[in-house]
Amino acid sequence: MQRELTPAEARFVSDARVGHLGTQRMGKWPHVVPVCHVLDLDRIVIASGYDRKIENIRENASVTYCVDAYSEDWDHELAQVIVSGEAYLIESGPEFLRDRGLLYEKFPQYERVAPIDEGSSVIIEFRVQQVHSTGVNA
């Protein structure tokens, strides 16, 4: 459904360390991968190398992102937020540097283990346009 994240959903997504990004090429199977993200207001920000998900986004910008929490207590502790939007790619410039800074702040290990550099990395960014959630309370 078309709506913004509630404050509880935004906290849940923001606090999560990993989620799953779904992309799809026209006429091909969906491609789903675990990635680290930052929620910046209503934008999901993700870094990537030039790989399958980038190829897919270049062909079809529609993406879906899922953050979930699992528990053996299925009655009370399962939660998920699934968001969708139209992705765009940022390959250089001030917005790239700003988003890289947000990712380095949340994930300091990025800088040492998997640096996000112009030329070898790309930022995937999308505004949350659709939201579906269960188990996330105010």
Image (tube, rainbow, N blue to C red):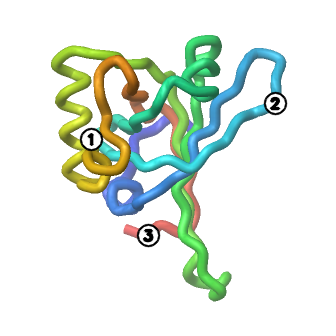
Q: Position of residue 68 (x, y in %)?
A: 55, 62
Can you say whether 108 is above or below 114 in the image? below
Question: Residue at horizontal 23%, vertical 46%?
Answer: 104
Quarter the N terminus occupies: top right
Of pointers 1 and 3, the one earlier in the residue sequence: 1
The CA distance from mark 1 to mark 3 is 21 Å
Q: Position of residue 130 (x, y in %)?
A: 52, 36
Question: Residue at horizontal 72%, vertical 20%?
Answer: 25
In the rendered structure, the answer to whether residue 9 lies left or right of residue 106 reads: right
Of pointers 2 and 3, the one earlier in the residue sequence: 2
* In front of the other: 52 or 16: 52
* In front of the other: 81 or 36: 36
Of pointers 1 and 2, the one earlier in the residue sequence: 2
The CA distance from mark 1 to mark 2 is 29 Å
In the rendered structure, the answer to whether residue 86 lies left or right of residue 117 reads: right
* Residue at the limit of the structure toward the front, as seen here: 112
Q: Which mark is residue 137?
A: 3
Can you say whether 118 is above or below 65 in the image? above
* Residue at the limit of the structure toward the top, as seen here: 59
**Label 3 element class:** loop
* Camera-nearest label, 1 or 3: 1
Can you say whether 23 is above or below 105 in the image? above
Q: Position of residue 37 (x, y in %)?
A: 39, 46
Q: Amino acid at mark 1?
A: Asp
Quarter the C terminus occupies: bottom left
Q: Amino acid at mark 2?
A: Trp
Q: Position of residue 15 (x, y in %)?
A: 34, 62
Residue that mark 1 sits on? 40
Figure quadrant of residue 115 = top left
Figure quadrant of residue 29 = top right
Q: Would you call the spot at circle 2 few (<14 residues within 10 Å), some (14-19), or many (20 or more)? A: few
Residue that mark 2 sits on? 29
